[in-house]
Image (cartoon, helix red, strand yellow):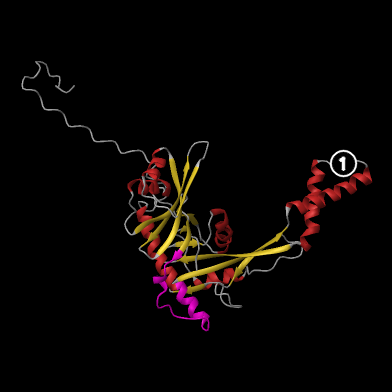
Amino acid sequence: MFKNLIVYRIGPEWVPDLVAAEQALAKEPFVPCAPSQPLSLGWVPPRGIEHAPFIESVGGQWLVKLKIEQKMLPSSVIKRRTDEIAAQIEQTTGRKPGKKQSKELKEQAMHELLPMAFTKQGHLQAWIDPQRRLMMVDAGSTKRAEAVVTPLVKAWEHFALRPLQTRLSPAVAMAAWLTQGEAPAGFSIDRECELKSQDEMKSVVRYARHALDIDEVREHIAQGKAPTRLALTWAGRVGFTLTEQGVIRKLAFEDVVFEGRQGSADRPEEAFDTDVAIATGELCQLIPDLVEALDGELQPGELPADLAPATPAPAAAPAPAPATAPADDTPPWA
């Protein structure tokens, strides 16, 4: 059901209303690109059945799906057509197009080529947990997730989002786990990670299918390389890769998770509900455990633990007076 997760916190003013939310998305259904339109996006039924709702609620968890269609125009093709138009103008007028006109010619070339371009389609899923006030987008980068976030914020009244941040940055936490050779409670460290230096060289060391509880890894960290990715398994049930930005990638559910799964190819609706219920049920436990492993959620206005100023140490207690005190009133520890 999900390959990646970027987690957002929903603002306190939003009131979950499934009917109103469905009506809002129904106003922006997916429509294929027009001949001269480079990009089109809109909502489609998550269940994949025509005329089904644009929001599926399974066990109180909401699913939405955005469909994206984009015309594919290679830059080399655009350049060739732009050069052809420019050559025709030069031959007719006897002068080369200037910088401003060249930009206009490029736009003209794109407009001419769009009706003949191939299209590429894709989907982005989002899962909303109204009770916990969280939204998870199945995307590997924040930039890609914005394709879902932006239209939802516009469509739903008071639907404000901010990335869920933790008090301890993932990079600092992963460095501690690797240095100590011990994962946080409920997790285990797998056999893949990436370390990157923080200097201008940006040197990268990658380990794949390799033990990580070795001195070599600890030495890289001691020399200033920070973990940017680390493979983990939660409760022996869900494997994933955590990035330095807190993105959960490469989600993989262990076979034990779907044992006894109901539904089949003959009953796709039942299988859909079962898969959603199982996947969200597991992830609803994984996410808070991961947040706890990163020292809890960072509240608005609060500094991350690795950036917050250190708490001053308490003042030392005065030393006991010597047996023979000075004649004046100056304290012996002054």
Asked if one can make out residue 310 in the rendered structure from this viewpoint, the answer is: yes
- Is 267 one of the magenta-colored residues? yes
Q: For residue 313, what is the image quadrant?
A: top left
Name, please, the residue furthest toward the left. 323
Residue 103 in the image: state x and y as whole percent.
78, 46
Relative to 109, does residue 195 appear above or below in the rendering? above
In the figure, is residue 106 to the left or right of 199? Answer: right
- Residue under circle 1? 96
Asked if one can make out residue 10 in the rendered structure from this viewpoint, the answer is: no
Badge 1 element: loop
Relative to 117, does residue 246 appear above or below in the rendering? above
Quarter of the picture containing the C terminus is: top left
Relative to 218, does residue 324 appear above or below in the rendering? above
Q: How many marks?
A: 1
In the figure, is residue 38 to the left or right of 65? Answer: right
Task: Indicate the amino acid at tag 1.
Answer: Lys
In the image, the segment drawn in magenta is 252-276
In the figure, is residue 331 to the left or right of 177? Answer: left
Relative to 288, does residue 105 appear above or below in the rendering? above
Q: Nearer the viewer, residue 81 or 30?
A: 81
